[in-house]
Image (tube, coloured by chain):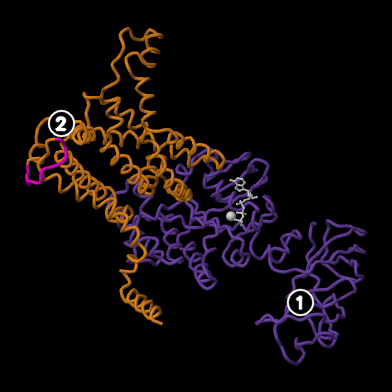
Amino acid sequence: MENTGLRKRILKFFNRHENLRSFGVLSPCIFWIGIFFLLPLLFMATYSFLERGLYGGVNWLFTWENYTRFVDPLYLKILLRTFRISFLTTVILLIVGYPMAYRIARADKRWRNILLFLVILPFWTSDLIRTYAWMLILRDTGLLNGLLKYLHIIREPLSLLYTEGAILLGLAYVYLPFMVLPLYASIEKLDTSLLEAAEDLGATPFWRFLKVTVPLTKSGILAGSLLVFIPSVGVFVVSDLLGGAKAMMIGNLVQLQFGPARNWPFGSAASFILMTIVLLAVFGYLKFAGGKEALEEVR
Amino acid sequence: MDVSVELKGVTKRFDEVTAVDNVSLKIRRGEFFSLLGPSGCGKTTTLRLVAGFEHPSEGKILINNADVSNKRPYERNVNTVFQNYALFPHLTVAGNIQFGLERKRTPKDEMLRLVVEALDLVRLNYMGDRYPHQLSGGQQQRVALARALILRPEVLLLDEPLGALDLKLRKEMQLELKSLQEKIGITFIYVTHDQEEALTMSDRIAVMETGRLAQVGTAEEIYEYPKTRFVADFIGESNFFSGKITAIDDNHLYLITDGGLKITLPADKAHTAGQHINFSVRPEKFRVEPEPGTSDWENQFIGEIVNKIYLGESIHYVIALSAKENINVFLKKERSGPQKTVFSIGDKVHVSWHRDDSVILVD
Ligand SMILES: Nc1ncnc2c1ncn2[C@@H]1O[C@H](COP(=O)(O)OP(=O)(O)OP(=O)(O)O)[C@@H](O)[C@H]1O
Ligand SMILES: [Mg+2]
């Protein structure tokens, strides 16, 4: 029985090396990530150090130029705008999403499911269509300007579309569920007897929120912030439709390079710069906000 | 009387359930007061009303003679030890204990001193840096206690604080809690459904039955003179009889039970001959002897042992006194002599009890 002999040896190996055991279980997952995530990343990393080909593609000649080119007020401004918008989106959604999630988590059972369903409902249509809807509302001849004119509040249409404000609005709208759902999950788990204990020990509602509710729902706050911040840094549909050329974000720049500009190496370099900054920002944030435990939790 | 907490006709309704029903109580300053009763009788609700988590549907609550009925918990000088302890998992032991002080903006060094003192009081010295999940159940319980006591409340409320502990630790903590309470002199309102716990620890006990007060009194009053069948049955064990009064004189009340036993009870002016009443006798009050003669108690009957259950420190006999009446009797084990208590099923025995050990019940 060779087969059982081999099996025994494998089992013995994993018994001796406890910490390698999880790799056995994870191996399909590792394979998947390797093919569909790491390999493309490797391609991009390579491309970002090559010269652009004339008609797209690359020439196999090493250069730093794609990175040095990025250090330019034009691009840095885009980068800065991207982070400003993503940061503000996250903050706005925390402020809007927290009370919303709190209310849902504290609603009675029957209502809770209905309200959660309503939060998720927009997922049933694509981002694109929902963003177009905002265009119809915000443009000069759109619903909002029409209404304001009708009410004689304004005479000339306000230019709402193609501004940073419009992008903020669009992003906050699109990513609301990503903030509300993790917050809901952590608030729902919150033991109400802890809130009572706080109040019993003299905490006013505000003090209680600060000292008990927020720390105990930290995992939801961290998860929600990351789920909103990271994708909004890379967004391009929303910013393209609502921001246009006037308020370009880095996602649009990358898309431009891979698309019309046919400069894949520069697009790759821009992506890498973005990725590095996001990674640093996220780790910095987790370190600052959560210490080691939060890092562990996200892992 | 120095009243710490007073409930005046307090009623609490949840939709159609009346959890607390017209309860009036005065609890003295420094008293160890227990609320005792079966599950669902409204003990927790009563405590939550005093703490301020619930507000009465009717009636008033006074703490230190001030009406607090509409005050929020953080406006009341009352602290609670929760059944599940409700320790803040994100704070250390010290962090938990000083939570209330931080709110009061107590100076740093003063706070440190008080925390050390509180840790010392509950014998958790040097545990300040641990997190609640690193503590045993008994230690968590003490942190909860220290956290509440450090604020020097007018009243400390405890909702089955020992419920989650094993029997041995529970006994230890009972003694510890009691001596702690005597030391610091704060009024304790203690909820439990464990009658033994209530009897050993309390200065006074309120027995509750479906939202009402069944009886309030010292452990001895409640054990020896239960007012109702519910109290007699809930606290300890009891034998119940009912019968018709045949005569009453200055010192005695005579009746004949439904099973035909002629019984002498202490006199009771509230009753008249011909009335039908219930009374109870505790199982350890009986004398059981193989031969008649040594007992001069009023109530003497011949019975037959019908069942015998060995309980360790004592033996539980079921003895038939009449065709209708079986009694439960607890006897210490004595193998021989006049106090012999080791009998077999089927033995004929002489059973007697003193008239004052029969307690007339109101229902
Ligand atoms: N928030 C509430 N909503 C509705 N009914 C409630 C609420 N709180 C308590 N009740 C009801 O009030 C009654 C008394 O409950 P309470 O918790 O005071 O009982 P208890 O004596 O503490 O019981 P236990 O020993 O099981 O803890 C119960 O019938 C309970 O179902
Ligand atoms: Mg209870």
B244 is higher (above) or lower (below) than A216: below
Q: Quadrant of the C terminus of chain B?
A: bottom right
Q: Which class describes the residues within 10 Å of circle 2: few (<14), some (14-19), or many (20+)?
A: few
Question: Which residue appears farthest toward the bottom when viewing the image?
Answer: B336
B307 is higher (above) or lower (below) than B271: below
In what element is the residue under mark 2? helix
> Is the C-beta separation of discs 1 and 2 under 8 Å?
no
Q: Colour of chain B?
A: purple
**Image quarter for residue B109?**
bottom left
Chain containing mark 2: A
Task: Say if the magenta span includes residue A61.
Answer: yes
Chain shaded orange:
A
Q: Which residue is mark 1?
A: B329
Q: Residue at x 66, y 66 (%)?
A: B220
Q: Is residue B150 left or right of residue A192?
A: left
Q: Is residue B86 left or right of residue A266?
A: right
* Residue A77 circle label: 2
In what element is the residue under mark 1? strand
Question: Are the residues under marks 1 and 2 on the same chain?
Answer: no
- Residue A211 picture location, percent across and down: 36, 46
Chain containing mark 1: B
Q: Residue at x 39, y 78 (%)?
A: A3
Query: What's drawn in magenta, residue-wise?
Result: A55-64
Q: Which class describes the residues within 10 Å of circle 1: few (<14), some (14-19), or many (20+)?
A: many
